[in-house]
Every structure is written in structure tokens, then in C-alpha cells.
Image (tube, rainbow, N blue to C red):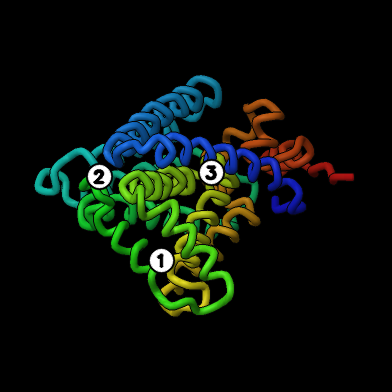
């Protein structure tokens, strides 16, 4: 299931393309953070519906399809319903209902069911990323038009004393690119957490999501200072998301487990980090046969 590290290079390429598109769409166009958020939520909801349709029609995974739709509803309620109408418990309950439906249905496609702790790590860190994003929206005031709490954090990081040799380089990036356009960067940052947190929770295109989360954690670590104690949580996130990628956690009670048997080979390679022999091996293991060994 883990394979060589080379198989994660194609998903890295996809992640880089997505990063370029996100930065080009938001900061380079100087779009307001709320425009970025509304666009991202629309894409997420439409994407969830499309994936659910594929799961239902092609993969014959009806409960997983239902779980994907429930997940879209959870995110919609987290951002669009008022805190009085939908307190944090509402979207969180919907989130775990979605995860349970997906895990139940993808169990038949999970080759190594004893690896279920990997699914826990993947789901809970995905949940944490999503919770972080909605907290930026509801509490951190990142979407008020001037970057809010994000702008304050970025400005503070740009002006703090350097603690090691890379700090001046990153602080120059913050001063030159981020703080002058803090509103757009706040939107892209929070929406990034929302998007790859969702992908991790679903176990959908997990290597791509893991690469994006590693990028996000790296930026938080550099912003706070690699040697700073304040970055300890970001270092934990970095290691956890790296482990999720290297162990193929999306193939354990995640959508990737079911999708790998139906998507084209090029899609499995570039978006899921899988090669044909691994897909055949997973199918053989799932059916209780001896799987072929890679040459």
C-alpha cells in the first residue's frame, strides 16, 4: 500500500498546479476574501455532488455517495447558517455522520482493515483543518475586508526578530507580497484549509490533499519561526499529514479505496499516487486472492 516515494511525485505536480491557480485567482487578482470563500464553497458543493453521482452510478457505493452529500451539507451549514441556527455541534455531527457512511460503504474496498488507525488520523486531522477554516471565518475575522486576524499575524511575523538564517527570506516575502494584500491571502489560506481538510476527511485524492496540507503547515511554521515553540502544533500537523500520505491512508475506509477500482489509470497515477500493479494488488487482496508482486 505504501510503495516507493516516487509514486507521490505525480500528485505533487497536481498540488503545485492547484497552488498556482489558487494564488493566481486570489492574491494576483486582488479578489476580496468573501469572493474567494463563496467561490470555493460553490466548487466544493458542486464537486461533492459530482463525486457522489460517480460513486452511486459507477462504483455502486450508495452509502458513500450519501455520505459525500451529507459532507457538503455539513460545510454549507458551517459557513452559511448563522451561529444561532447552526452552532458548531450541528456541522460537526453532520461531518461525522458523513464519515461514518463513507467508512461503512468503503469497508468492502479496504484491503487492510486492520489499518483502521490510519483512517482515524486522516479523518481527525481533516476535521481539524476544516474547523480551523470555519473558526477563521466566524471568530478570527479573516473575512472582514482587511485580513483581520490573519493580517495581524502576518504583520507580527514580518516584524519579529529573526531566530535563524531563513527567517529574513520568509519575512521579506510576508512584507512584500502578503501584508499589502492581506485580505486576499487570508481568503486563499482559509479556503485552502477548508479544501484539503475536506479531501483528507473524505479520503479523496489523499496524496494531493496531503501535499497541500504540508505546504500550509510549512508556511505556518515559517511564519511563526522554525525554532519557535509557538509552531509546535504546526509541526505536529506536518508530520501527521506526511504520515497520511506515505501510508496511503485514503485507501483505508476512504473514497480512494472505492474509486481506485474504477477511475482511469492516468487519474489513479496523477491524483491518487497509484500504479496499475498496486490497484490490481488491492483488488486481489480485497477478494482474498494472492496479489501480484511489483517487478
- Identify which residue, 131 or 294, lies in the foreground: 131
Q: Which residue is mark 2?
A: 78
In the rendered view, does 60 fall on the left or right side of 69?
right
Q: Nearer the viewer, mark 1 or mark 3?
A: 1
Mark 1 or mark 3: name the one nearer the start of the chain: 3
Residue 245: percent from left, percent from top: 61, 53
The answer to which quarter of the image holds residue 259 is top right
Q: Secondary structure at mark 1?
A: helix
Q: Which residue is mark 3?
A: 107
Does residue 72 lie above or below 170 as drawn? above
Cα distance, mark 2 to mark 3?
A: 28 Å
**Category of crowding for the residue at label 3, using alpha-carbon neighbours closer than 10 angstroms: few (below 14), some (14–19), many (at least 20):** many
Which quarter of the image is occupied by the C terminus? Answer: top right
Q: Residue at x 48, y 48 (%)?
A: 200
Cα distance, mark 1 to mark 3?
A: 47 Å
The answer to which quarter of the image holds residue 288 is top right
Residue 23: percent from left, percent from top: 47, 41
Q: Which residue is mark 1?
A: 158
Q: Secondary structure at mark 2?
A: helix
**Category of crowding for the residue at label 1, using alpha-carbon neighbours closer than 10 angstroms: few (below 14), some (14–19), many (at least 20):** many
Amino acid at each position: 500500500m505504501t510503495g516507493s516515494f516516487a509514486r507521490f511525485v505525480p500528485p505533487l505536480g497536481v498540488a503545485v498546479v492547484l497552488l498556482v491557480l489558487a494564488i493566481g485567482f486570489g492574491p494576483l487578482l486582488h479578489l476580496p476574501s468573501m469572493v474567494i470563500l463563496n467561490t470555493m464553497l460553490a466548487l466544493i458543493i458542486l464537486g461533492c455532488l459530482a463525486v457522489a453521482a460517480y460513486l452511486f452510478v459507477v462504483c455502486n457505493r450508495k452509502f458513500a455517495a450519501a455520505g459525500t452529500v451529507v459532507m457538503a451539507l455539513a460545510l454549507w451549514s458551517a459557513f452559511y447558517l448563522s451561529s444561532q441556527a447552526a452552532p458548531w455541534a450541528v456541522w460537526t455531527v453532520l461531518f461525522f455522520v458523513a464519515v461514518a457512511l463513507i467508512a461503512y460503504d468503503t469497508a468492502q474496498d479496504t484491503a487492510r482493515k486492520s489499518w483502521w488507525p490510519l483512517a482515524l488520523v486522516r479523518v481527525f486531522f481533516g476535521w481539524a483543518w476544516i474547523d480551523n477554516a470555519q473558526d477563521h471565518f466566524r471568530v478570527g475575522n479573516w473575512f472582514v475586508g482587511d485580513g483581520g486576524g490573519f493580517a495581524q499575524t502576518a504583520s507580527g511575523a514580518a516584524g519579529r526578530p529573526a531566530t535563524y538564517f531563513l527567517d529574513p527570506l520568509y519575512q521579506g516575502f510576508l512584507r512584500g507580497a502578503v501584508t499589502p494584500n492581506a485580505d486576499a491571502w487570508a481568503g486563499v489560506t482559509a479556503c485552502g484549509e477548508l479544501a484539503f481538510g475536506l479531501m483528507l476527511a473524505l479520503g479523496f485524492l489523499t496524496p494531493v490533499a496531503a501535499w497541500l496540507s504540508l505546504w500550509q503547515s510549512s508556511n505556518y511554521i515559517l511564519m511563526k519561526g522554525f525554532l519557535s515553540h509557538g509552531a509546535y502544533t504546526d509541526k505536529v500537523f506536518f508530520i501527521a499529514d506526511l504520515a497520511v500520505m506515505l501510508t496511503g491512508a485514503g485507501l483505508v475506509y476512504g473514497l480512494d479505496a472505492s474509486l481506485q477500482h474504477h477511475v482511469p489509470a492516468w487519474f489513479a497515477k496523477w491524483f491518487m499516487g497509484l500504479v496499475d500493479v498496486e490497484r490490481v494488488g488491492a483488488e486481489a487482496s480485497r477478494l482474498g486472492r494472492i496479489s501480484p508482486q511489483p517487478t
